[in-house]
Image (cartoon, helix red, strand yellow):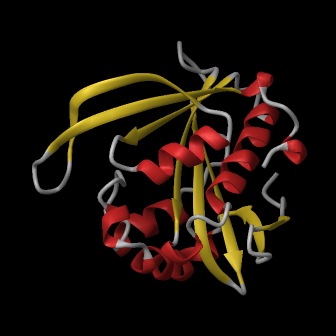
Amino acid sequence: MAQFQKEGILKDGTKVILRPMVKEDRDKLLDFFRRVDDKDLLFLRNDVRDPKVIDHWVNNIDLTKVFPLLAEVDGKIVGDVTLHMRKVGWKRHLGNVRVVVAKAYQNKGLGTLLVNEIIELAEEFGLEKLVAEIHLTATAALTMFKHAGFSTKAVFEDLVKDPYGRSSDLVVMVCDVQAQEPRGKRQ
C-alpha cells in the first residue's frame, strides 16, 4: 500500500498526484503548512508549523494506525488528508478523517478528491464508518464532507474553543463506507 500513487484532476483541469506520506516529505510538509491560511490553522489539532511536530509524524509513520495521503502539484504538497484507525476496542470499525487544503487549491474539488480516496482506502482497511469532527464555522469543510458522502449526526454546542478562547459548536459528520457508490461516479 505504501507504493500507492494515483493521479487526479481538479475542477480547473489541474493534475494532482495522490500518494502516501514518506519520511522524505519533511521539508515539503513544513513548506505546505507554512502556506496554509492562518484562519485554516485555527481548526487543526496540532501546531503544524512546529518542525518538531512534522519530525514526529515523518519519523513515526505506521500506515496501519494513521494513513496520511498527500496531494502534490509540480512537486509541492497542496493537500493532506489523514485516516486515523484503531485495531482493537469498541471503535475498531471506525476511522477518523482530517483534511487540510492549501488556500490556492480550495474550491477546486481537491478536498473532495482526497476524502473520496480515503473512503476507498477505508474500505480496503475493513472500516465500516468514517467520522469527521468539524468546527461549525468551517463552512467550506462542512460542504466538502457533505459532497463526499458524509452526513451530520450531531452538533455539540460550545464544545470547542479557538486559540482566542471563543467557544463554538462542533459538528460530527459520519460516512457509511459500504453505502458509498464507487468513487469514479462521484462529483
Residue depicted at x 85% and y 32%: 181
Residue depicted at x 33% and y 34%: 170
Residue 173 drawn above or below residue 2: above
Q: Position of residue 2 (x, y in %)?
A: 78, 57
| Residue 130 as seen in the image, left or right of residue 57 | right
Q: Is residue 84 visible?
A: yes
Q: Position of residue 20 (x, y in %)?
A: 71, 60
Asked whether 98 or 143 is in front, the reply is: 143
Residue 126 drawn above or below residue 138: above
Residue depicted at x 78% and y 29%: 180
Asked whether 116 or 187 is in front, the reply is: 187
Report which quarter residue 70 is drawn in.
bottom right
| Residue 185 as seen in the image, left or right of residue 104 | right
Residue 4 drawn above or below residue 103: above
Q: Position of residue 135 (x, y in %)?
A: 35, 43
Residue depicted at x 75% and y 64%: 19
Which residue is outermost to the left?
165
Report which quarter residue 10 is drawn in.
bottom right
Residue 122 drawn above or below residue 46: above
Which residue is outermost to the bottom?
74
Q: Is residue 83 visible?
A: no
Total of numbered circles in the picture?
A: 0
Report which quarter residue 149 is drawn in.
top right
Q: Position of residue 166 (x, y in %)?
A: 12, 47
